[in-house]
Every structure is written in structure tokens, then in C-alpha cells.
Amino acid sequence: MPELCAREWDLLIVGGGITGAGILLEASRRGLKALLVEQRDFAWGTSSRSSKLVHGGLRYLAQGHVKLTREAVHEREALLRDAPGLVEPQGFALADYGASKRKRRTMLAGLALYDLFAGRREAHWLPAAEFALRAPGTARASLQGGVVYTDAKTDDARLVLRTLAEARRHGGHALNYVAARSLLIDAGKVSGAVLRDEAGDTLHRVRARLVIDACGAWAGLLGQHGPRLRPLRGSHLVLPAWRLPLAQAISLMHPNDGRPVFAFPWEGATLVGTTDVDHRDGLEQEAAITRTELDYLMLALQTQFPQCGLKEADILATYAGVRPVLDDGAAGTPSQAGREHAVFARPGMVCVAGGKLTTFRAIALDTLRLAQQQLPDWRDGLAPCRIFDPVAPPQPGGRMPGAMLRRLAGRHGAQAQALLDAARDGELDTIPGTDTLWAELRWAARAEAVQHLEDLLLRRTRIGLLLRGGGEEHLARIRSICQAELGWDDAHWETEVAAYRQTWNKHYSLPTEAEHAYA
């Protein structure tokens, strides 16, 4: 780190979520010298706790946000093209239990516009019998039929890591567990920041021609002024696939308030979400699901899938994220708040706020267009190009399903072959209950800037979400694979295990108290 901090940078990007990662990639591939710092782990905040959907946003279209929807659909299509194995199509089905013909026509008209933006055409309405075949297990009483459409899904944390890896290939640099403590100001102009390195507990004064605040829900903590944010919490459940087996996503309207709730197959499990509630807790602490939110999601599931007999004991894990939504001052419900982004500047600094996972490239390009005004010797048309460079499929030493090779290439890009080459006996098997290879743990520990055990189990891989107890039963084997790669002695390992258990129990397990009402 000292060597990097001694350099002068064109851009110092603060924030290691998908927005900061996207800016680092687009800046680096266009010749700027750029350094990104993240005070926690890469994707620690919203970008590992999203709904895992890459989508245009039918709800936003219904609210009249046509421009946002069009942009999001275009970006979804680009990600499907450029990130196969990481961003994959996901079919959705929405049952109709007697909605008005007007509401049905409105939905179908919206989907026709959705198709127009994507440059394709699909059939969206299915009669009851055909819909029931597409969505087995859904409640049949009063079923009139249903609407089907296609969006996409991803592993959001791996999307951040893949973006950072692509940026490094273009000369960008990224450091986790390095916090920006304050700004450097010269003659009224921001000229860098004071950084604190957690590992060495040292301070560094880093100079940059421009500082970019890409801190998401934490934007503005460095002291600049701009649009107000309305932090909204979205909470989710993860269930075993065998308890709620789904061939495609089911979108349903909550029986209490008519909000959309979904359940879809993800990483070998079933993901359920999301709530949408004002987050009134401080941002210093990790978000966690509340008892009221859990009850809200369980009621939706029990109403839609009555024959499954789902109970809280079926839940493998929970998680909650805080969305960086712009506050327009309106007093509407959280679900009515827009997902647009805003970019603003002061001398020596640019801040970006708001936005959504799907549109991270568009957000990055908008940010650089404003940054260009303060970098007069840098000129670039900033036309969109491929999000990721094409990657040759890795070649395993033995037989491996094509779907797994596609998955590895999508998540690890150009490093997928090195990951396979590093695997030892038995490590090309999947971890039971997941789609993850044991070898992915070894590679993450060796080459992906893991500083803490939670980085490995909650973000580099997702087994902390996919396995009961956060993967507790596999910790012995994980230790045998990863401890030496991480360079941790026995005492360090035990300290990390204790910290991971505490984090998981507090933020990823079932809540024990009703602390806040869902409102």
C-alpha cells in the first residue's frame, strides 16, 4: 500500500460497491490512472445484499419512469451478452386471481413496451392450465391464468469482483479495508484524501486530481453537499430448493398491501424478497431483517404456496441491504421512491448518488462525463463499449459439465483457468447444497484480497447464505483448504471464526425481537 499511496492519481474513487467498481473499470480502460479504496470489504454494503436481479424494472415503468426503464433494459441486455455465466436469464410468472381486465391490459401493455426496449417479442399471457404447468405449487383457487416474462439474475458480489478484476487488467488499482478519513483541500479545491489502512493502522495522504465519492447509501460522509438520500431497507430469505422448488421466478402481490414479492431459484437455493421500508437505524451497523419483515415475507409465501407448509425453521439464512435512493421530498411509500441516480460536482470532487445495480455502467459513464469537465487534458467520447472482454472457456483436466465451466468463466473471468489449475484432489466437487466448488474457496483465499473469514464465506463465495448456520458444519474442511493460503496461524483462524459466527448470528440468522414495524 505505501507505494500506491505515494503516487499521484488522476482519480481517487471512494467506495468499493458496484458503482465505484464500474467507475474504476470505465476510467482505467480509457487511460486514467485510478485508485479505488473501500473502508470495509469490496461489495460489503448494498452490492452484496441486493435482490440479485438484473432487471428493467416493471414497477418503475408503471410509475411512469420510462427513461429509467429503457436504460435499465438496455443495460440488462448488455450484461446478458457480455457476462454469460454471471448474468443469466430468469423467467418470471405472475398469477392472476381475478384482477380487473383493465389492470391486466395495463400489465400486458407495459410488457410490450419492455419487449420493445429489448428488441424482442414474447407471448406474455397464459391461460390457467398452462400457467399452472409453468408455476407448479402455486395456489389454484380462483386462478384465472397468468403473465410470464423474462428478466435476469446474478451473483451481485461476484459481479463487483469481476468488474474490479477487469479494471485491474486495464491498469486500475483497488484496495479493501482502507478508509477515506478526510479530504485534502488546497486553495478551496479538493486535492486528495487522508486514508487509513486497517491492516497497518496507518494514515496516508494520497493526492489525486479528482476525488469521486461513490459510497452509495453512505454518500456524503466526506462532507460534500448534494442530493439527500432516503435509505430504504430490503430484506430477504434464503430457503432450501427442496422446500420451495421453482423452475422459474414467481412474482406475487402481497395479500396485505399489494406490493410485489418474488421467489426464484438462485445458486442452488430459493431466494425470497423483498421488503421496502425506511431504514431508520444508523448506517454504521450492518442492516438486518426485523421480526415484522420476516412475518411479512412468510405470510406472502404461505398465501401463495399453501400446500408447502413453509415454516420459519425452513429458512437457511436472511440478509438485508440498504438502498441508496434519492430523496425527492415526497411523502410517498418507500416502494414509490424512484431509482434514478444523480451526479454533482465541486472543485476537485464528483459525487454520485442513487441508482441501481443493473445500470452501473451507465452511472459510471455519467460520472466520468462530469469528471471530464475538471480534467481538461483528458478527452474521451465515453461511448459504451463491451462491459467485459470476452473470455475463453477454461479447460479442466478431467470431465466437467459445460454449465459449470460457463459459471466459472462468468464469475472469475480470465482467472478461471488459474482457479482450475490450483485445485487439489476433490476440490472440483461442489460443496453440498450449493453450486460452488471447493476450489473456489482456495482461489479466493489465495488471490482475491480476503482479509477476514466473512469476506470468504459471505462475498467471495455465498456459502454463508446458502448453508444452514452459515456453513458451520464445513468449517473444518474450509480451514484445511484456506488457512495456509491466507497465512493465518491457529490463533488468528480461531479469532476469525469467532468473529464470523457473531456476525452471522446477528445479521444473517432469524431475528429474535420485533424492533421495528414494517411501515
Image (spheres, grey):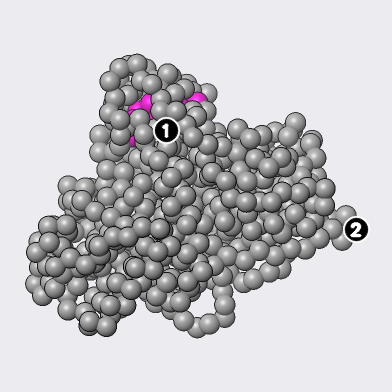
The Cα atoms of the two marked residues, 2 and 1, are separated by 48 Å
The residue at the point 52 percent across, 40 percent down is 388
232 up-or-down from 99: above or below: above
Kindly state the secondary structure of the residue where label 1 is placed: helix
Mark 2 and mark 1 lie on one chain; the one further toward the N terminus is 2
Hey, what amino acid is under mark 2?
Ala
Q: Can the viewer see residue 181?
A: no
Left or right: 464 with respect to 445? left
- Which residue is at a point 30% across and 17% down the rendered structure image? 398
Q: Mark 1 belongs to which amino acid?
A: Ala
- Which residue in the protein does label 2 denote? 187
- Figure check: 106 above or below 217: below
Which region shows up in magenta?
Answer: 436-446
Membership of 437 in magenta stretch: yes
Residue at 44% x, 23% y is 417
Residue located 52% across and 28% down the image: 447
Judged by its main secondary structure, the magenta piece is helix
Query: Mark 2, mark 1: which one is toward the viewer?
Result: 1
